[in-house]
Image: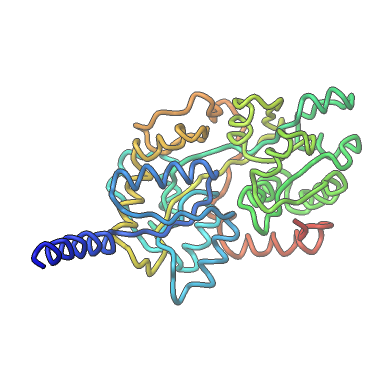
Amino acid sequence: MKKLLFTAAIFFVATGSALSAERLSVLCGADERWCAEMKTSFEQKSGTRVSMVRKSTGEILAQLRAEKDNPKVDVWWGGTGDLQLQAAEEDLLEKYVSPNKPDLLGWANNFEEISKGRASGIYAGALGFAYNADILRKKGLPAPSCWKDLTNAAYRGEIQIANPASSGTAYTALATLVQLFGEDESFKYFKTLDANINSYTKSGSAPVKAAARGETLIGIAFMHDAVTLKQAGFPLEIVAPCEGTGYEIGAVSIVKGARNLESAKAFVDYALSPEGQATGKKAGQNQVPSNAKSEVPDGAPDISSLKLIDYDFAIYGASDTRNRLLARFATEIKAADSQ
């Protein structure tokens, strides 16, 4: 009987310890492989049990809005920061300044200031497009080098881009072209481009993945996503558009009303540390990390050598600007709401 009671006591202590372990719920807007690597790495580092779900940034923002009065998520990690700026403006995010802030590069600190301390930059990546060199050669088509080349009728039905209503990548493309060409001219551009689009995808990286697999000729996406695929052996040629291009700042933030606030803060600190940012390279990703002490992946595009626009995150991350542009896109651009 004593042995039985002792065994039961040990079982109760072990079970109670497991049930009381720290937990954390994270929505991830980065590549699936990076989501998985970050989950495993942080669990090993902290002992916290992490529930990580991958969604597009538009879907994440929609979920946070829907759960505003009863949040079920603690952290939003990865994906284009424009939508996290909008979430900050809508009071969906908790203010938190990490002790790693002094080690962050200027563009990351500027992003945090725009968010009023509610979101922190974790990586940067430039927008561009990539084409499948094998298909281009077989069809005898010209190689595009500029945004305006993509409206060539030779590419009819040969291009994919995501839907800006669901994808932060595509919204970055929309905002980039508005800043490059002016709003009315950019919408004229998109109307012409629409004739060449075979699909508006939900995910921002899906178009370049389709180009890699030979399912479309050209995919508009962030250049680092195309680099990762090219390193894997796919026949992609990556283009930094001649007119200039915009860029993203991927971000991390704590959801307002997070149930596991201290664990959420620890996750943000880890995401901004060199060790946490190294998970990107381990997962085969090629974004430029925000911590000055982090190692830059070998395949990361040299942002300093690209013709980047002075992307205005304050204006194009604001809800009124984003909502207006998305409404106009849905109204004026054919098939803008298709998936």
| x, y percent for residue 74 | 40, 62
| x, y percent for residue 96 | 33, 57
Q: In the image, is residue 205 above or below residue 338? A: above
- In the picture, residue 149 is in which quadrant? top right
Who is closer to the viewer here, 110 or 162? 162
Who is closer to the viewer here, 317 or 298? 298
Quadrant for the N terminus, please.
Answer: bottom left
**Who's the residue at 67% across and 59% down the image?**
165
Instruction: Indicate left or right for 183 with 36 as reference.
Output: right
Q: In the image, is residue 214 above or below residue 177? A: above
**Who's the residue at 13% across and 67% down the image?**
5
- Total numbered labels placed on residues in the image: 0
| x, y percent for residue 297 | 47, 28
**Who's the residue at 37% across and 33% down the image?**
292
Instruction: Indicate left or right for 41 with 133 as reference.
Output: left
Q: Residue furthest bottom?
A: 69
Quadrant for the C terminus, please.
Answer: bottom right
**Who's the residue at 25% across and 62% down the image?**
15
